[in-house]
Image (tube, grey):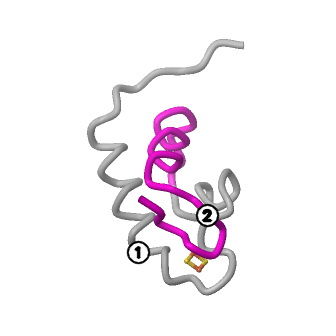
Amino acid sequence: MYVCLCNGVSDKTLREVVRRYQPKSIQQLRQLVPVGKQCGKCIRAAREIMDDELQHAPLYKEIA
Ligand code: FES
């Protein structure tokens, strides 16, 4: 499902990015994916997905 229609960002993409990079804020998430950079209507949904994914994601650090 698309979360950000303006930039074609899906919930699957957001979840993968959050799991991999574990952004601490929506600003950090926006530096990783082009979510909310146009109309901004997707910010709330993106934040909910980020919070949900961070709650369930195990903490790990990428090596290399
Ligand atoms: S829907 Fe994401 S910026 Fe418009």
The correct choice, above or below, for 43 with respect to 30 in the image is below
Is residue 38 shown left or right of residue 23? right
Ligand 1 is found in the corner quadrant, namely: bottom right
For label 2, the residue is 8
Residue visible at 34% across and 26% down in the picture: 58
Region in magenta = 1-24
Given residues 3 and 60, the one toward you in this image is 3
Q: Quadrant of the C terminus?
A: top right
Measuring from the top left, give residue 29's x and y in whole percent. 58, 55
Q: Which amino acid does label 1 sit on?
A: Arg
Is residue 11 within the magenta segment? yes
Q: Residues within 10 Å of mark 2 (few under 14, many from 20)?
A: few
Measuring from the top left, give residue 25's x and y in whole percent. 52, 58
Number of callouts = 2
Task: Measure how far apart labels 1 and 2 are at the Cα level.
Answer: 16 Å
Given residues 21 and 36, the one toward you in this image is 36
Measuring from the top left, give residue 28's x and y in whole percent. 62, 56
Measuring from the top left, give residue 59's x and y in whole percent. 40, 26
For label 1, the residue is 44
Name the secondary structure under disc 1.
helix
Q: Which mark identifies residue 9?
A: none
The correct choice, above or below, for 56 with respect to 46 in the image is above
Residue visible at 45% across and 46% down in the picture: 12
Disc 1 vs disc 2: Cβ atoms closer than 8 Å? Answer: no
Is residue 22 shown left or right of residue 54? right
Is residue 56 within the magenta segment? no
Q: What residue type is labelled 2?
A: Gly
